[in-house]
């Protein structure tokens, strides 16, 4: 489930900060609820991705110690948990509002495409990662019914695109000579 990665979901709080509504308890509660929903959704994606990358993770110097790569948890149990988390996140998201539910469904769909297909392509790989953060920012705005700024979206996209490219470059430098997935 990678709880350490849930920090990425803090991007949901961007809109409430930039519209200076972070003292509004109702809106803050909605964003916090949205954060939990995205933690469920992202956990579902991480689980599915770990099953999809099983053969590569078993050869990776750090990822081989993950429970799925070690064989400590059977892939069937992982997929079952991922389906439960994804279903919960989608169903719960409709309680916030329909636009927010659309962002959760979009996030799940984009990341499923990424896990099984899009990560094979060098530039598309990092663009999809950046779009995942953009979806989070939009989700935070629609959860509290505020208009999001084009500048906020563009800033988020380019910042996270830069970080994703830097991460891939670093990963390539450390895995030089090892078998990696096609996108690297």
Image: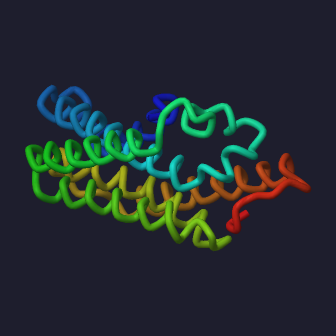
User: On the rendered structure, is 164 left or right of 30?
Assistant: right
Residue 16 locus on image (x, y percent) = 28, 40
- Residue 142: x and y in percent read 21, 53
Residue under the point 28% across and 41% down: 85
Front in this rendered view, residue 98 or 39? 39
- Please identify the quadrant where the C terminus is shown: bottom right
2 or 138: nearer the eye?
Answer: 2
State the residue at coordinates (50%, 36%): 5
Residue visible at 63% across and 73% down in the picture: 121
Q: Position of residue 62 (x, y in %)?
A: 72, 36
7 or 22: nearer the eye?
Answer: 7
State the residue in front, 136 or 168.
Answer: 168
Q: Is residue 26 left or right of residue 137?
A: left
Query: What residue is drawn where x is 51% and y is 49%?
Result: 51
183 relative to 92, above or below: below
**Which x, y percent locates residue 144?**
17, 45
């Amino acid at each position: 489930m990678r709880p350490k990665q849930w920090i990425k979901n803090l991007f949901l709080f961007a809109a409430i900060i930039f519209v200076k509504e972070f003292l509004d308890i109702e809106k803050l509660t909605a964003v916090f609820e949205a954060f939990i929903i995205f933690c469920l959704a992202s956990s579902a994606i991480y689980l599915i991705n770990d099953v999809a990358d099983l053969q590569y993770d078993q050869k990776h110097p750090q990822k081989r110690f993950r429970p799925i790569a070690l064989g400590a948890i059977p892939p069937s149990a992982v997929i079952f948990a991922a389906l439960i988390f994804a279903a919960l996140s989608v169903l719960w998201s409709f309680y916030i509002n329909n636009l927010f539910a659309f962002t959760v469904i979009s996030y799940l769909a984009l990341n499923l495409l990424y896990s099984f297909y899009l990560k094979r392509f060098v530039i598309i790989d990092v663009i999809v990662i950046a779009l995942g953060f953009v979806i989070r920012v939009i989700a935070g705005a629609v959860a509290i019914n505020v208009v999001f700024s084009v500048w906020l979206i563009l800033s988020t996209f380019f910042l996270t695109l830069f970080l994703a490219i830097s991460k891939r470059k670093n990963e390539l430098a450390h895995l030089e000579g090892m078998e990696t997935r096609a996108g690297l």
